[in-house]
Amino acid sequence: MRTDIEPGPLHLVRWIYTTRSITIGWIELQGAMRASGLMELEAVVAVARCRNFRAAAAELGRSRSAVSHTVAALEQRLGVRLFNRTTRNVSLTEAGQAFVATVGSALAEINAAIKSASSRRTTPGGTLRVKAFDAVAREMIAPIILQYLRCYRDMNVDLVTNGPSVDITVDGFDAGVRRADDVPRDMIAVPLSYELRMAVVGSLVYLENRRKPRVPQDLLVHRCIRFRPSGGAVEPWKFERRGKAVSIDVVGPLTLDEPAFVLDAARAGAGLAYLRESIVAADLAHGRLVRVLEDWTRPFPGICLFYPRRGNVSAGLRALIDLIHEIGVQSEP
């Protein structure tokens, strides 16, 4: 095997052979990278995916400065710039694109090899990485994870709840948590909850001198509290009745990124809110909020844990799946 590296940007392409396992050899041959090689590669791949150092740092559980210094040190050692950086944007250079295209898949294989080896343990141990894709998924999996850690003292759990949507296999996660209808077809799904349902609610103060909406289109003349997930776009309000689906881009002076804040604003009379039934159940029962358009809100698929259909299931993941089966399918959190 060659161990010389030709100068210039193309040495990355020449050095990354068609066999992905060469990445391991490359790390071994770089003396200064022996201790931190995988961390450097993971940092580069995360920044490329997130296009942002802060988001990549959050996903990796490191500081922004640490990730930035790690990437800069690798670029200096390689003698080529992997990223173009401006105050507002981070993008891959041509050499960086070639580098990440191969290193990303190689990292996936390395992580798969590690998981395969750990799956031979009979007693769960090590770290389980889980990606939760939205607020309800986070709420559903959090109490299960806490119970899991009480049962398995040798396990650590890395639960990632922010950052962009990812391919859990490529990005080194053991499992993901999201709505059942969003689970990729090549994954195995383990149900966590029954169907869920949304509710449109407002306070007595807000509705006192206003006409209650009778159809979704009436919302366009109301002040609505809009919801925008962290890092995402403002979500439309979705309705269905008698097979007719309607999506309304509501308007209003307030846009929030946490359901708890939306609930507080609705209680304060800031406008109508669109929240899960479980979040507003107590307020409805005590008369603090009033529900409208109930006949237009239909159940939607519940939440699932999911993991790759192919490959070995680690002892840690198998223990989590068994615990979920033991607990049983839940109602809304």
Image (spheres, rainbow, N blue to C red):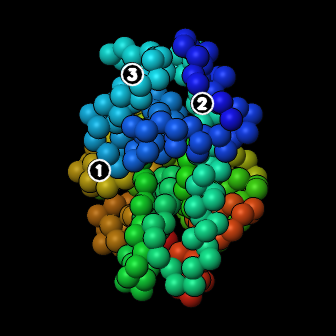
| Disc 3 residue crowd, few under 14, some 14–19, many 20+, Cα 10 Å | few
Q: Nearer the viewer, mark 3 or mark 1?
A: 3
Q: Residue 258: x percent and y percent?
A: 35, 49
Residue name at image x 39 percent, y 37 percent: 32
Q: Identify the image quadrant of the N terminus.
A: top right
**Residue farthest along the left direction in this orientation:** 268
- As displayed, is residue 112 above or below residue 323? above
Q: Residue 125: x percent and y percent?
A: 47, 76
Callout 2 amino acid: Thr
Q: Where residue 3 is drawn, which disc sits there?
A: 2
Q: Residue 226: x percent and y percent?
A: 40, 40
Front residue of 227/123: it is: 123
Q: Identify the image quadrant of the C terminus.
A: bottom left
Residue underneath mark 1: 261
The reply to whether callout 2 and callout 3 are in contact (CB within 8 Å) is no
CA–CA distance in space, label 2 to label 3: 19 Å
